[in-house]
Image (cartoon, rainbow, N blue to C red):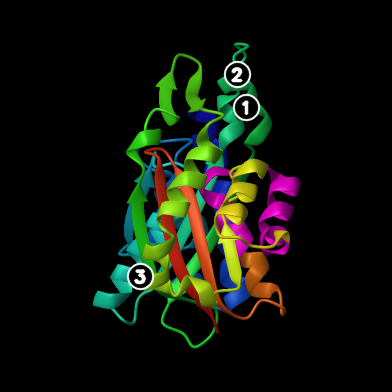
Amino acid sequence: MEVFQHTAPELSALASTACLNQVGEKASAVTHLILVSCTGMVAPGVELQLMEKLGLDADVERYCIHFMGCYAAFTGLKLADKILRSEPDAKVLVVSVELCTLHFQKEYTEDNILANSLFGDGAAAALVMNSDKGLKINAYLSQVFREGEQDMAWGIGDFGFEMRLSKYIPALLDKGISELREVFERKFGLSKIRNFAIHPGGKQILQKVQEAFELTPEVNFHAGEVLRQFGNMSSATILFVLDRMMKDPKVEGEILSMGFGPGLTLETMHLIKQ
């Protein structure tokens, strides 16, 4: 946690500055700050250090979303959307920072081998505000698959945080998503959507989602590239995928985005590229 407290604010500031520069907004315009992380917790929090580094006003409202796992960026974006519904002029900075390699486990077990080889470090930020450009948050859906409750878990151990990551997760997701196809059709118009932003929790997860929706491999191009270059950066990963899709001129219209995490939880967000 000492390493997290020292490193996370700087990495968060770099991601936040890049985000604000990309949209042409000054830090002084930010009204709300949401910090997302499941790999470190300190108090006073990283969000306070980040406010100082960015020069944010002292009255900026701040929220922390901790220990929810890989889907937590969706939770942060949904909270930002709800803030905007009550305060239309708000500019909400959502920052995800994950230092997964702090929790490298040396005991030779299947869970540790999977986690050590799959997870990496990263930070990403998104500015959520009312605008006529970017990715519009149109709708979202949360679902819990109780059958997989013990197959993905994250707890505090004696030598860092410990991951339980069952090899059955891709099959559980395949079954769960297949059962939800009618729900997705009613809520999002699934059959008309051509763009998908899937959290790249692993190569098999991308493949199983693709098969469940009967999609071509091309839909996972951006997710696959993020996984190949950076690994699974927990909650920050989906923001990397969405950033690539936002900058890709071939991606137009609706995007259905999904993230998975402990629970076994599925978060789904319907976006429209403007």
Q: Secondary structure at mark 2?
A: helix
Question: What is the crowding at mark 2: few (fewer than 14 residues within 10 Å), some, or many (at least 20)?
Answer: few
Q: Looking at the figure, which quarter contains the C terminus?
A: bottom right
Residue 43 inside the magenta-drawn segment: no
In this view, 250 is above or below 222: below
**Distance CA(mark 3)–CA(mark 2):** 39 Å
In this view, 137 is above or below 266: below
Please identify the dominant SS of the magenta region.
helix
Name the residue that disc number 1 marks: 114
**Cβ atoms under marks 1 and 2 closer than 8 Å:** yes
| Amino acid type, mark 1 | Leu
User: Where residue 184 sits: x, y (%)?
Assistant: 41, 65
In this view, 83 is above or below 200: below
* Sequence order check, earlier mark of 1 and 3: 3
* Magenta residues (range): 218-242
Name the residue that disc number 3 marks: 81
User: Where residue 226 sits: x, y (%)?
Assistant: 69, 53
* Residue 14 in view of the camera: no
* Residue 166 in view of the camera: yes
Name the residue that disc number 2 marks: 110
* Sequence order check, earlier mark of 3 and 2: 3
| Amino acid type, mark 2 | Glu
